[in-house]
Image (cartoon, rainbow, N blue to C red):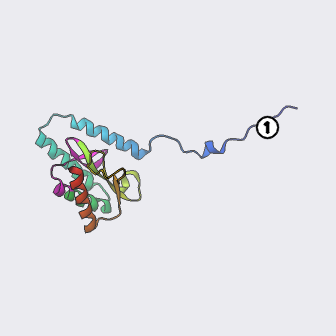
Amino acid sequence: MANTRKPAASSTATARKPEGFTAEERAAMKERAQEVRASTRRTSRAGKAAEDEAAVLAKIAEMRDSDRSMAERIHAVVKESAPHLAPKLWYGMPAYARDGKVVCFFQSAQKFNARYATFGFNDTANLDDGTMWPTAYALTELTADGEQRIAALVKKAAG
């Protein structure tokens, strides 16, 4: 007698989510591509700095109220703590760079549908402390103590 039973479908095959980039990740990559194209335009250094800061402020203005207020305060703290860092957009997020390389950035909670906003540092930040140290901080609100901690971190990171 021939076996007419079909094998059962694998439960793991139907439970898996499709691999690849999320809509938010694809949007961030598109924003980064636009930023790179914009950076290749020939403008004076002062004109480029003004354009970059205006783009950062416009991106902050688009954020939800809670993230916007934190981003505005962080922008002011970074400019005060490390005036030589240049504001610029990085994957659609406000960021601050030294010699064109991002040192720190603010990621709003809405950017990737996260529970909290993040203030983070890239590997160009001078924050090394032994063999392990934090590179990002979750923010649910920004207090005066938080501003002081961010100012100290930014000063150290900017070297």
**Residue 24 spot, x, y in % from top left:** 40, 47
Q: Amino acid at mark 1?
A: Arg
Judge from the rendering whether residue 117 lies leftward or rightward of residue 12; answer left or right. Answer: left
Can you identify the residue that label 1 sits on? 5
Q: Residues within 10 Å of mark 1 (few under 14, many from 20)?
A: few
Looking at the rendered structure, the secondary structure element under dot 1 is loop
**Compared with residue 42, is residue 133 higher up or lower down, i.e. above or below?**
below
Residue 68 figure quarter: bottom left
**Residue 88 spot, x, y in % from top left:** 23, 46
Residue 33 figure quarter: top left
**Residue stretch in magenta:** 78-100
Judge from the rendering whether residue 32 lies leftward or rightward of residue 76; answer left or right. Answer: right
Q: Residue at x 18, y 53 (%)?
A: 82
Q: Residue at x 38, y 59 (%)?
A: 116
Q: How many marks?
A: 1
- Residue 150 shows in this picture: yes
**Residue 46 spot, x, y in % from top left:** 11, 43
Residue 154 belongs to magenta span: no
**Compared with residue 119, is residue 143 higher up or lower down, i.e. above or below?**
below
- Residue 94 shows in this picture: no
Q: Residue at x 21, y 55 (%)?
A: 155
